[in-house]
Image (spheres, helix red, strand yellow):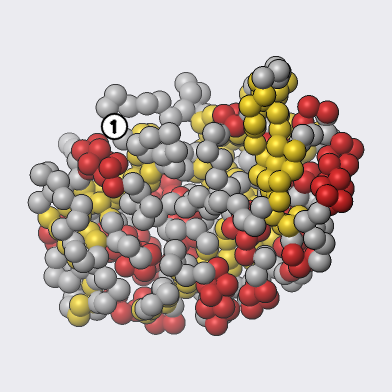
């Protein structure tokens, strides 16, 4: 006799179980709404039922309507594909075909993007239509997140609500009335993690906007009473250049997505002395592995092996490997590309070195600079440069050289608040600091002071050749 499968527990079901929806809200740059309002209204009007069992591409411009669509559609749609707002339009047809998209949810005009296979277009905005939406779950919804796609069409990574929320259970206190925000976009893994932490932990959420200057966002976050905030180290380096960072008083600060060097950890500790400051390791494929809150860069070697949290880590050939129930289920597409090895470990491509009982991230495998056969990780050099009190942030890269093939050079943004001018004397100080701790081939042969460094849409320092 075939056993009847239990009904899936949707995001809406789990959100409703946290209670106290009347005092919780979602806030965008231009609008906000109470979570309690969702019990008697819908962002999709009367068309929620049309999306049952469909593969839905979510293309909303702003994060607020996107978040409501995700809350409403988990357990309803067969598949949810989260479309980052910076996705190049030429990639959309391939994604529609690979994910078998047959419905699009977006802001007006809802008929974009068009494809012959897409027959259903539903408008979604932050304005709720009154009614009694039927959100009974009937699907184990697949959540599809896109990789960065720096070398072409992004890969489509398959998650479930369970794999996405695996690191969240028990991590936050229900009813804590936390107000979360992030520099990330929720259509990317890091931002989605924060949205789920807010929703499943009993808190509220403030969304950033790509159209909003960082200083304005921080002022708005302060007015909303933000208590928990996350971003990449590059996000934070840019934010700390603004006096508006003093306008928030978080009790929790989280970094992820890039190597958190000692300079940025110390700077955040000085800015927010009352906050718990943690840096986490996570990736779209491997999920959340761990976070570290001891104020030091890297992580204790004791975290390798079985962590007792359903996560197992090992280091092989210098790279961090992760096995976890939080890992994505695979890549969508045919033929399917293996996401993990035969033992279930995802090779993150993040290189680490063991020193005195602690592992330190030194860079990405694909970002190594080859200097006459000697290897240089740009991030390792940047960590040394960033320690100088007059440096806000830096980017180390290769420049072609006819003798060694390449040389190391650095672009540096000076911290104007430190009061030191971008001078030859400052260059000499930075180079002297590098020579004290780095091998000769790792020391930059040239330094250039620049007004700013490019940060990608995912919040990471743009590395075009990595």
Using the image as rendered, state which of residue 230 and residue 398 is in the foreground.
398
Answer above or below: position of 465 versus 276.
above
Q: Is mark 1 on a helix, strand or loop?
A: loop
- Relative placement, left or right, of 43 versus 47 is right
Quadrant of the rendered image containing residue 240: bottom right
Using the image as rendered, state which of residue 286 and residue 27 is in the foreground.
27
* Residue 438 image offset from top left, x and y in percent: 83, 34
Quadrant of the drawing holding the C terminus: top right
Using the image as rendered, state which of residue 252 and residue 150 is in the foreground.
150
* Residue 387 image offset from top left, x and y in percent: 80, 51
Residue at position x 20%, y 45% in the image = 101
Q: Can residue 129 be seen in this view?
A: yes
Quadrant of the drawing holding the N terminus: top left
Quadrant of the rendered image containing residue 23: bottom left
Residue at position x 51%, y 42% in the image = 283
Q: Mark 1 points at which residue?
A: 333
Answer above or below: position of 122 versus 304.
below
- Relative placement, left or right, of 451 versus 414 is left
Residue at position x 38%, y 44% in the image = 146
Residue at position x 83%, y 29% in the image = 439
Answer above or below: position of 186 versus 316.
below
* Residue 411 image offset from top left, x and y in percent: 68, 46
* Residue 462 image offset from top left, x and y in percent: 55, 45
Q: Is residue 13 visible?
A: no
- Relative placement, left or right, of 409 versus 424 is left
Query: How many C-alpha atoms fall within 10 Å of the one at disc 1: few (<14), some, or many (≥20)?
Result: some
Answer above or below: position of 341 versus 465.
above
């Amino acid at each position: 006799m075939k056993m009847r499968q239990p009904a899936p527990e949707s995001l809406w079901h789990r959100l409703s179980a946290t209670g106290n929806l009347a005092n919780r809200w979602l806030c965008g740059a231009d609008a906000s709404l109470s979570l309690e309002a969702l019990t008697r209204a819908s962002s999709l009007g009367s068309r929620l039922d049309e999306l049952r069992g469909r593969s839905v591409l979510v293309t909303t411009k702003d994060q607020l309507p996107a978040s409501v669509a995700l809350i409403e559609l988990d357990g309803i749609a067969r598949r949810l594909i989260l479309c980052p707002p910076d996705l190049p339009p030429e990639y959309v047809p391939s994604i529609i075909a690979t994910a078998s998209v047959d419905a699009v949810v977006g802001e007006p005009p809802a008929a974009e993007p068009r494809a012959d296979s897409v027959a259903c277009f539903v408008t979604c905005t932050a304005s709720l239509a009154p009614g009694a939406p039927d959100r009974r779950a009937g699907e184990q919804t697949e959540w599809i997140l896109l990789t960065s796609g720096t070398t072409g069409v992004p890969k489509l990574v398959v998650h479930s609500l369970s794999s996405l929320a695996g690191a969240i259970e028990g991590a936050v206190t229900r009813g804590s009335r936390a107000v979360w925000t992030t520099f990330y976009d929720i259509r990317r893994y890091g931002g989605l993690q924060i949205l789920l932490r807010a929703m499943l932990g009993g808190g509220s959420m403030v969304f950033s906007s790509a159209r909003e200057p960082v200083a304005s966002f921080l002022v708005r976050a302060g007015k909303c009473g933000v208590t928990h905030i996350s971003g990449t180290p590059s996000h934070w380096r840019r934010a700390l250049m603004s006096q508006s960072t003093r306008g928030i008083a978080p009790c929790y600060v989280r970094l992820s997505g890039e190597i958190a060097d000692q300079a940025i950890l110390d700077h955040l500790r000085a800015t927010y002395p009352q906050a718990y400051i943690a840096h986490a390791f996570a990736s779209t494929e491997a999920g959340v592995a761990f976070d570290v809150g001891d104020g030091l860069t890297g992580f204790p070697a004791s975290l390798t092996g079985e962590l007792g949290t359903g996560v197992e880590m090992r280091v092989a050939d210098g790279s961090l490997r992760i096995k976890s129930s939080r890992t994505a289920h695979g890549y969508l597409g045919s033929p399917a590309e293996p996401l993990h090895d035969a033992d279930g470990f995802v090779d993150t491509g993040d290189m680490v070195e063991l020193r005195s009982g602690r592992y330190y991230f030194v860079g990405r495998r694909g970002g190594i600079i080859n200097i006459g056969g000697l290897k240089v990780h740009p991030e390792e050099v940047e960590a040394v440069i960033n320690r100088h009190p007059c440096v806000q942030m830096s980017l180390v890269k290769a420049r072609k050289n006819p003798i060694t093939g390449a040389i190391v050079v650095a672009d540096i943004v000076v911290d104007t608040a430190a009061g030191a001018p971008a001078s030859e004397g400052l260059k000499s100080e930075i180079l002297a600091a590098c020579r004290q701790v780095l091998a000769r081939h790792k020391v930059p042969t040239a330094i250039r002071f620049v007004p700013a460094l490019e940060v990608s849409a995912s919040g990471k320092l743009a590395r075009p050749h990595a």
